[in-house]
Image: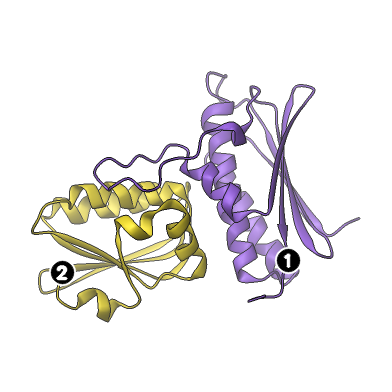
Chain colours: A yellow, B purple
């Protein structure tokens, strides 16, 4: 798993590459904890290089979503492949989190 | 010998990752569709994580073994997971409420729910002192 982070204005964009599963979720958790501890209120998660996600990865996302829950904050996810989308649909995450096709869509209006 | 692979892991860190790597290699050799391979990867992660966290709970560190056998047949991929943990049928858990909001949402049970939905058949059997979980994923034409 590779995690890269950059900022654009007041938005942090974090890209996950590889698998977000029970093995790699602690690493993802640590990265998101760091980003949120830095005071990030607007977060875009780029999954365009993510191969698959399991419930361990969903747990990390849910934690970040809860912490970003305030009115002036936002979390958007983009670039989901078919399997990741399927996992989001089965788990109901596609209705509780904001999922958009591309990074440009995610940044629009944030 | 039928085409496939067999890996035995314990509770050591990196065990599940070893299975994931073997599965990726198997999928490449047998030219499995991406969707099938990814679904298998998710199912293996969920079930192995469960067995290690609950099936082997309370045992001496380092004890406990899970054997993963994956086999490619003409129309399907069959997965058999055998462990010597305490008796546990993962598929009797109640499906989680996936309609709850972010604030009240919990993750428990979600992994098994994913396995059930992403595999075509799931089964459990207690065989002697072992748990045996069998999964089937059919190979369909992409988009069919």
Q: Would you identify the image quadrant in which residue A80 lies?
A: bottom left
| Same chain letter for marks 1 and 2 | no
Q: Position of residue B143 (x, y in %)?
A: 63, 76
- Quarter of the image with the C terminus of chain B is bottom right
The residue singled out by tag 2 in the image is: A11
Q: Is residue B14 visible?
A: no
Position of B144 compared to A87: left or right?
A: right
Q: Is residue A69 above or below residue A52?
A: above
Picture residue at 10% right of the left edge, 69% below the top: A10
Q: Would you identify the image quadrant in which residue A50 lies?
A: bottom left
Front of the two marks 1 and 2: 1
Residue B139 is labelled as: 1
Mark 1 secondary-structure assignment: loop
Q: How many marks?
A: 2
Picture residue at 53% right of the left edge, 23% below the top: B57
Picture residue at 51% right of the left edge, 31% below the top: B53
Subunit of label 1: B
Q: Is residue A55 above or below residue A52?
A: above
């Amino acid at each position: 798993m590779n995690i890269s982070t950059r900022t654009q204005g007041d938005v942090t964009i974090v890209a996950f590459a590889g698998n977000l599963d029970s093995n790699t979720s602690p690493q993802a958790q640590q990265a998101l904890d760091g980003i949120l501890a830095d005071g990030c209120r607007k977060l875009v998660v780029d999954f365009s290089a993510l191969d698959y996600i399991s419930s361990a990865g969903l747990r990390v996302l849910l934690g970040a979503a809860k912490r970003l829950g305030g009115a002036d904050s936002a979390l958007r996810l983009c670039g989901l492949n078919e399997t990741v989308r399927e996992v989001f649909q089965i788990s109901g995450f596609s209705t509780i989190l904001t999922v958009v096709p591309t990074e440009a869509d995610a940044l629009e209006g944030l | 010998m039928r085409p496939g692979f067999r890996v035995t892991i314990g509770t050591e860190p990196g065990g599940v990752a070893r299975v994931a790597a073997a599965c990726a290699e198997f999928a490449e050799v047998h030219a499995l569709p991406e969707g099938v391979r990814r679904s298998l990867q998710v199912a293996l992660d969920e079930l192995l994580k469960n067995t290690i966290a609950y099936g082997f709970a309370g045992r001496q560190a380092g004890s406990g073994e899970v054997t993963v056998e994956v086999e490619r047949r003409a129309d399907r991929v069959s997965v058999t997971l055998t462990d010597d943990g305490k008796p546990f049928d993962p598929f009797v858990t109640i499906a989680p409420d996936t309609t709850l909001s972010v604030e009240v949402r919990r993750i428990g049970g979600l992994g098994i729910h994913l396995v059930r939905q992403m595999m075509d058949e799931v089964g459990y059997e207690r065989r002697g002192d072992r748990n045996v979980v069998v999964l089937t994923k059919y190979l369909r034409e992409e988009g069919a």
